[in-house]
Image (cartoon, rainbow, N blue to C red):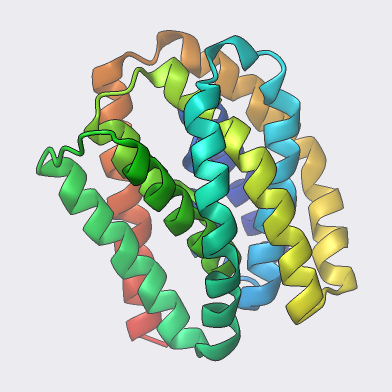
Amino acid sequence: MGTALSFLCIILVASVLQTSTGFGFSIMATPFLLMLFLPQEAIQINIILSLLISISLIWKIRTDIDFTIVKKLIIGSIVGVPFGILIFISININAFKMGVSILLLVLTLLLILNFRVKPTPNRDFIVGGLSGLLTTSIGMPGPPLLLYFTGTDTEKGKLRATTLAFYLFIYFISLITQITFTGTNKLIWESSLYAIPIVFLGLFLGQIIFRWLNQRIFKILTFILLSFTGIYLLIETLNS
């Protein structure tokens, strides 16, 4: 019962953050789902629900999408996807969790230091490739996108729409890749099914929050989210 409640709370909070910030679900959900499920299960549940969220939101915010960037991200991600699945297959669980936590903490530090990246066509492809690699390996395409778009001061509405459009592609491809190379199981799909009502509740609450979330609060929320999840997972991994 406690595990089920924890799972639903994780999904609710992550859904609210995904809707209000455009990146929060995988960054929030994956580290905590790793504490409840095996890596394969945590990643596939995350991908299934993230794909559902992207499908649910994309039509409403489609006018804010930067399709030029999305196309470049997709092309780059195709290169990164196979490398990501190779990493996932070959790494052990503790190293896997520690890698996720360190990635989040490094990302947070770069954002706090006001790291800036000048957008170029080549960098669009590179960011897409890194996102593809991270999606199939740890189920988290968001960190490279977040760092890239935040570093270029991308407006929050454009950031949310563009990342969601890219997620539609990368989550679908990553789910197929994960199932093909690592298989799937009943628990993954049952857990995802039970979480759907909570996801839609989170979507509703997230839309409300997004209306009053200014750019300053948006950045503060980003730092808190990344640092908290990174530290929590790192401590949990070191103590296991």
Residue 55 in view in this figure: yes
- Nearest the viewer among 44 and 207 is 44
Q: Is residue 83 left or right of residue 192?
A: left
Q: Quadrant of the C terminus?
A: bottom left
Residue located 27% across and 30% down the image: 219
Q: Position of residue 189 (x, y in %)?
A: 86, 61
Q: Nearer the viewer, residue 37 or 164?
A: 164
Residue 155, placed above or below residue 233: above
Q: Identify the residue at the far left of this view.
A: 113
Q: Residue at x 72, y 70 (%)?
A: 178
| Quadrant, the N terminus | bottom right
- Position in image of residue 213 (x %, y %): 38, 16
Looking at the image, residue 188 sits to the left or right of residue 23; the answer is right
Compared to 48, does 235 lie above or below? below
Quadrant of residue 196 within the rendered picture? top right
Circle count:
0
Question: What x and y, as percent, mark residue 103?
Answer: 32, 64
Residue at the spot x=9%, y=43% of the render? 113
Task: Find residue 176 and report its image quarter.
Answer: bottom right
